[in-house]
Image (cartoon, rainbow, N blue to C red):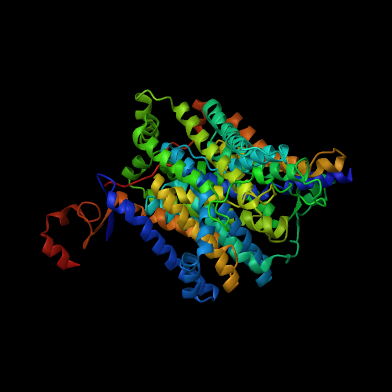
């Protein structure tokens, strides 16, 4: 029972970095931009969050630095793709390569160090409920922030004027431009938000989940987040389902050996990647439907001719 | 105010000049980076970009690094032209090395001129098999090949690790996770005496030559170009999109697999978990830096190889971290992509706000002199 409880608790925490990264990318893609540089922004957030938390001693400052690092990286991507009209796929790859390199350089002096665990918030009364209370209502503040962010994005996209404009830009940038909206400005804002989210996701990984720094520690999570956005058909609610599917697989993979099943650890480590592929196939095989869900201008360059 | 104006045609001259400008911008950015790190920028830059060119051993090492980069990049260039984004060359490289290496280990101590060709074949087929997965899933299930090929890279690296820790482990190796050293009959012949440069380099040059002919003269090269520029036109032209997707992934997968085998049977000489060192990803930069053009790719392969060798030199001489190479490569691609705007757009400068957009209607009838004078 005790072990089962611990596993459930691990499953709740596991996908938090993915939720942050994916919800940011969801907003970016709804505005019509495909940023493949998630992995790069995430790893920059991871090292920024880790090093600044360690140096300043303040977790809040560290997370802010991570968000800033992610946002700055996204800003580079934005200037290149939106102002200088570069190819989004190629620029996203460049961002990933750059981020992995720069984070390794930045993290040189930080290997072997470790951050202190983050204090958990007990939600008044709710945390006293037996079993469910400690499971759902005793977590660090970023877990609550992740969920608040998903709810906030859902509300923003469907219930606010700004959200409607963002979606209009993503569905038909020429029409949005003709009405008088500034397509580039909207997309830049979305990119910066997405970058900040990816940065926080990376920082959660490096300061809370595994509180130490290792080169390439994101290990493809940025790409998995990209797949989760496709899985979610660009809707915030479904994004949570996708993130928990991957989180569940990751945790299960860690515990399979604990149950006495004899299989090489490497085969189990392949699972999250193989599940990603499987899910992609299941989601995309209906061409018409996946086409219907995707923002119509996703990845297309926009040039204001007049 | 500055405004971009689309060109009717891509500027040919700028197409060749911009990579050179990009190299210049990267070096400038590098100067800033080293200054921030508190290292002597001039010394660092000259160590990375000039020193290797004056040393004959470093030059031969450049050939060693350029070989896999050129081979993989030539393969990728077909797909990138057609809009088929194989990002998983690193995985195909790994599986190619694994398949070819398995043949070498199975035929351990077997003498025979046919051992190496058989290994090459296994390497090519291994890379193709790994690339066939994204090809099949894209053509049959419409799954995004970027994500599938990338996920498979992680799987391939884990597969190499599990096999090297297990069935392919050296029986006399004190339980170290590495295979036996390949038998002399199963290693790639050396091209230049007393260096590590091997005949794989000639194969890479041959691949570039074949690619040049195919792109310029063969109907497949034409189909690839049309599909990249206008997928709809390709449909009207009656090309089968699926066939082009398959061909592009088979070519890039096969060449990446061959590159992997050359690496295992050449400079490394065995299978080790750390065999994939990122050539598959750096080759993406090589492909763009070379303008998707085979001759350009050969040159770009050497430029990127230079950053590797130079990075190693700087690491030893100035105690710089090896990650500097990765940062340089990222900045390279950034500046190239950014400067590329010049090939497709003209930059126009305007003194005053353009009429009709920001100025009210009445202002347009005012003479130009009066308007500029009023500001």
Up-down relation of residue B308 to residue B261 (above or below): below
**Residue B347 in the figure: left or right of residue B228:** left
Please name the residue shown 63% across and 53% down the image.
Answer: A201
Residue B19 in the image: x percent, y percent? 38, 56
Q: Position of residue A109 (x, y in %)?
A: 66, 69
Q: Report the residue at 66% width, 46% height from top.
A: B184
Quadrant occupied by the C terminus of chain B: bottom left
A218 left or right of A155? right
The answer to whether residue A245 is seen in the rendering is no
Looking at the image, which is closer to me, A73 or B30? B30
- Relative vertical location of residue B113 with respect to residue B305 in this rendering, above or below: above
Percent coordinates x, y for residue A250 in the rendering: 73, 43
- Nearer-the-camera pick, B13 or A230: B13
**Up-down: is B175 above or below B240?**
below
Q: Quadrant of residue A231?
A: top right
Q: Is residue B98 visible?
A: yes
Return the residue found at the far top.
B238
Q: Count every numbered label the image shows and give the total.
A: 0
User: Residue at coordinates 72% horizontally, 45% vertically from top-left?
Assistant: B161
Nearer to us in this view, A113 or B229: B229
Query: Which x, y percent locates residue B339?
Result: 36, 56
Q: B107 or B66, which lies in front?
A: B107
Image: B293 above or below B239: below
Name the quadrant of the N terminus of chain B. Answer: bottom left
């Amino acid at each position: 029972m005790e072990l089962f409880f611990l596993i459930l608790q691990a499953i709740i925490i596991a996908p938090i970095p993915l939720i942050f990264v994916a919800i940011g990318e969801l907003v970016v893609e709804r505005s019509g931009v495909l940023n493949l540089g998630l992995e790069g922004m995430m790893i920059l957030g991871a090292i920024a969050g880790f090093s600044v938390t360690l140096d300043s001693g303040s977790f809040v400052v560290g997370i802010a630095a991570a968000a800033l690092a992610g946002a700055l990286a996204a800003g580079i991507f934005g200037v290149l793709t939106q102002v200088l009209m570069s190819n989004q796929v190629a620029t996203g790859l460049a961002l990933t390569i750059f981020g992995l390199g720069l984070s390794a350089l930045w993290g040189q002096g930080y290997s072997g160090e470790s951050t202190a665990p983050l204090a958990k918030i007990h939600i008044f009364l709710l945390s006293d409920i037996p079993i469910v209370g400690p499971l759902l209502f005793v977590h660090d503040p970023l877990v609550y922030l992740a969920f608040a962010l998903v709810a906030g994005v859902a509300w923003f996209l469907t219930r606010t004027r700004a959200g409607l404009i963002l979606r209009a830009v993503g569905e038909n940038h020429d029409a949005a431009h003709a009405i008088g909206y500034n397509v580039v400005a909207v997309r830049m804002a979305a990119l910066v938000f997405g970058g900040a989210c990816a940065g926080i996701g990376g920082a959660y990984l490096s300061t809370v989940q595994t509180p130490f720094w290792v080169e390439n520690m994101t290990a493809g999570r940025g790409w998995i987040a990209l797949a989760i956005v496709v899985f979610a058909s660009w809707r915030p609610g479904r994004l949570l389902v996708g993130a928990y599917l991957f989180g569940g697989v990751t945790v299960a993979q860690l515990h399979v050996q604990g149950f006495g099943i004899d299989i090489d650890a490497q085969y189990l480590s392949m699972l999250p990647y193989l599940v990603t592929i499987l899910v992609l196939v299941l989601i995309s095989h209906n061409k018409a439907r996946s086409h219907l869900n995707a923002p119509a201008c996703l990845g297309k360059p926009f040039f204001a001719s007049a | 105010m500055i405004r971009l104006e689309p060109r009717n045609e891509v500027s040919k001259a700028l197409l060749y000049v911009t990579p050179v400008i990009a190299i210049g911008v990267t070096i400038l950015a590098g100067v800033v980076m080293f200054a921030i790190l508190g290292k002597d920028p001039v010394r660092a830059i000259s160590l990375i970009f000039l020193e290797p060119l004056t040393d004959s051993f470093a030059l031969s090492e450049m050939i060693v690094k350029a070989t896999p980069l050129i081979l993989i990049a030539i393969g990728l260039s077909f797909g990138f032209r057609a809009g088929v984004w194989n990002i998983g060359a690193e995985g195909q490289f790994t599986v190619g090395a694994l398949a070819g290496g398995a043949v070498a280990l199975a035929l351990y101590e077997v003498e025979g001129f046919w051992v190496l060709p058989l290994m090459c074949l296994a390497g090519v087929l291994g890379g193709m098999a790994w690339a066939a997965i994204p090809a099949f899933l894209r053509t049959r299930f419409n799954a995004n090949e970027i994500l599938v090929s990338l996920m498979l890279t992680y799987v391939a690296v884990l597969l190499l690790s599990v096999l090297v820790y297990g069935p392919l482990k050296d029986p006399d190796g004190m339980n170290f996770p590495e295979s036996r050293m390949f038998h002399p009959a199963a290693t790639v012949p050396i091209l230049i005496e007393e260096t590590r440069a091997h005949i794989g380099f000639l194969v890479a040059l041959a691949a570039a030559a074949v690619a040049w002919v195919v792109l310029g003269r063969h109907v497949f090269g034409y189909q690839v170009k049309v599909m990249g520029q206008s997928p709809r036109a390709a449909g009207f032209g009656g090309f089968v999109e699926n066939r082009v997707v398959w061909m592009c992934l088979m070519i890039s997968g096969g060449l990446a697999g061959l590159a992997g085998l050359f690496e295992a049977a050449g400079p490394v000489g065995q299978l080790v978990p750390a065999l994939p060192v990122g050539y598959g990803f750096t080759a993406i930069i090589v492909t763009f830096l070379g303008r998707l053009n085979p001759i350009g790719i050969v040159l770009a392969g050497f430029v990127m190889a230079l950053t590797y060798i130079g990075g190693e030199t700087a690491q030893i001489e100035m105690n710089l971290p090896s990650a500097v190479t990765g940062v340089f490569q990222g900045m390279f691609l950034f500046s190239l992509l950014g400067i590329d705007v010049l090939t497709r757009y003209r930059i126009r400068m305007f003194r005053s706000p353009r009429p009709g957009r920001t100025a009210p209607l009445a202002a347009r009838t005012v003479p130009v002199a009066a308007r500029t004078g009023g500001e």
